[in-house]
Amino acid sequence: MTARKRKAKAARAEPLTAPVEDYLKAIYAFERDSGAAATNDIAQHLSIAPASVSGMVQRLADQGLVSYERYRGVRLTAAGRRAALRTIRRHRVIEAYLVQALGYGWDGVHAEAERLEHAASDTLIDRMAAAIGEPVTDPHGAPIPTRDGTIDETPHQSLADAAVGTTTRVVRVGDEDPGMLRYLDALGLRPGAEVTLTQRAPFDGPLTLAIGSATCQVGAALASRVLVAAAGDD
Amino acid sequence: MTARKRKAKAARAEPLTAPVEDYLKAIYAFERDSGAAATNDIAQHLSIAPASVSGMVQRLADQGLVSYERYRGVRLTAAGRRAALRTIRRHRVIEAYLVQALGYGWDGVHAEAERLEHAASDTLIDRMAAAIGEPVTDPHGAPIPTRDGTIDETPHQSLADAAVGTTTRVVRVGDEDPGMLRYLDALGLRPGAEVTLTQRAPFDGPLTLAIGSATCQVGAALASRVLVAAAGDD
DNA sequence: ACGAGAATTTAGGCTCGCCTAACTTACTGC
DNA sequence: GCAGTAAGTTAGGCGAGCCTAAATTCTCGT
Ligand SMILES: [Mn+2]
Ligand SMILES: [Mn+2]
Ligand SMILES: [Mn+2]
Ligand SMILES: [Mn+2]
């Protein structure tokens, strides 16, 4: 019987550490599309050992940022969600600013934002956002939460799941792998682009796409990282 | 007899931590104008207990960033100086960028830069510098080291030491106290401004200054934070 | 030359975040 | 229902940076 009673929900005023902010972002994302964040998923996403995640998750629970039931995964509390969205806003505003104001390519901003998101003040984020006209999405098409933590989380279909013969519009792409981003850019698979899925090989085989006047084939793994909406949608 | 033999000068490739970078900056400044950095000075500058400085300084020595003789103060090695100047460049480029590109006041940039200097990549710093025309000084008049670590360290006279009756040009002001910066700004004591010292009260009393058509009195402590050059100098 | 007081270091402890190894719980297929 | 496996947790440790209290060493003034 180790420390069993925790003093959960202590009133936090101190700023969160960078690791804590990164955990909250990861938990937010897994919870959004799996209902709860699994220890192993978090570990893999952050490139740390699962045991380390167990430890951190308990500390997050002590701080009232997360609700946690042993072996059952973890969910953000209201405070945790607020903190996660704040960090996500920072990350995406920074990405957008680097591209629009400083000439970064969309493949180079993620790593930079991953560090700056923990160091920038709210004032700086607001000034960056204002300087580029209050962007609504980041360079990869991800929605930017508002200052007060509102975010448009409409789920999107992946290009991998589109029906053969349909034309869709790219809404958003994965932003973590710079090599993939360069490749997507070369193919013209950018947010806003119209893509027609002309063919799908069986057994998770490659998809044949028509983008503008060009044609290409991509693997199912790549296609799953491209989110699309019906071509006519706003 | 604790760990006496240290493995000094291990080849460092890993990035330095934020605390380490802040120590190196502080040591650089004290060494520049006192020959060596004293434990207590570093401690006070960083708002840390002197004992903590002793510990860190030994770690810095182990990393080959500093040469250290017990009870005798600390000096930067070539590697340490390189790292310090890199951080100083980052700090000052960031300050200049925030003022010139994002509309910050000169009293608000120091705290922001103090954090961002540890998170920004070299690429970001270069892009910022390019975006505002490769500035040579920061908003407080401090010289910005070049990419390759060259810096103009010409020592300047303080306004507190100027001769009565002389007219001087403000070169640089202290940048850490936002309140002082707002006051200096109100007085017109900005880099580039011409100031005539018209009177000095005895016993470290207030100085009477003429700035443009205005006149004011300032304490010796404030005047010592304002560095000046002969009015005609480049 | 020497003792007081200032400066510095050492000793011992703490938290955070990470690790590996070993154990426990949950899930799955039969 | 039950064993085997995957997922998760606990145990025990480590380094970085910080702290306070207790030495130690240096510096000065006389
Ligand atoms: Mn991050
Ligand atoms: Mn992004
Ligand atoms: Mn700093
Ligand atoms: Mn400055």
Image: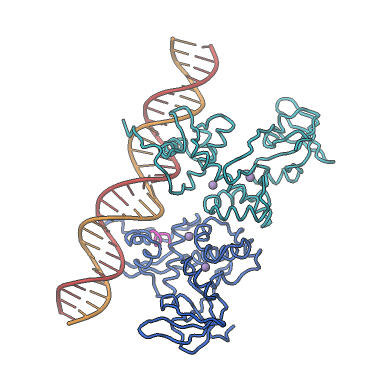
Chain colours: A cyan, B blue, C red, D orange
Report the residue at 49% width, 90% height from top. Answer: B165
Q: Quadrant of the C terminus of chain A?
A: top right
Assess whether residue B63 is covered by the magenta stretch.
Answer: yes
Assess whether residue A93 is covered by the magenta stretch.
Answer: no
- Residue A38 against residue B75 in the figure, above or below: above
- Residue A172 against residue C2 in the figure, above or below: above
Residue B142 visible to the viewer: no
Q: Majority secondary structure of the magenta segment?
A: helix
- The percent coordinates of residue A189 (x first, y second) are 74, 41
- The percent coordinates of residue A137 (x first, y second) are 67, 45
Q: Which residues are magenta?
A: B59-64
Which quadrant of the figure shows ligand 2?
A: top right
Q: Quadrant of the N terminus of chain A?
A: top left
Report the residue at 65% width, 33% height from top. Answer: A155
Residue B12 visible to the viewer: yes
Residue furthest to the right in view is: A213
Query: What is the quadrant of residue B152 in the picture?
Result: bottom right
- The percent coordinates of residue B15 (x first, y second) are 50, 55
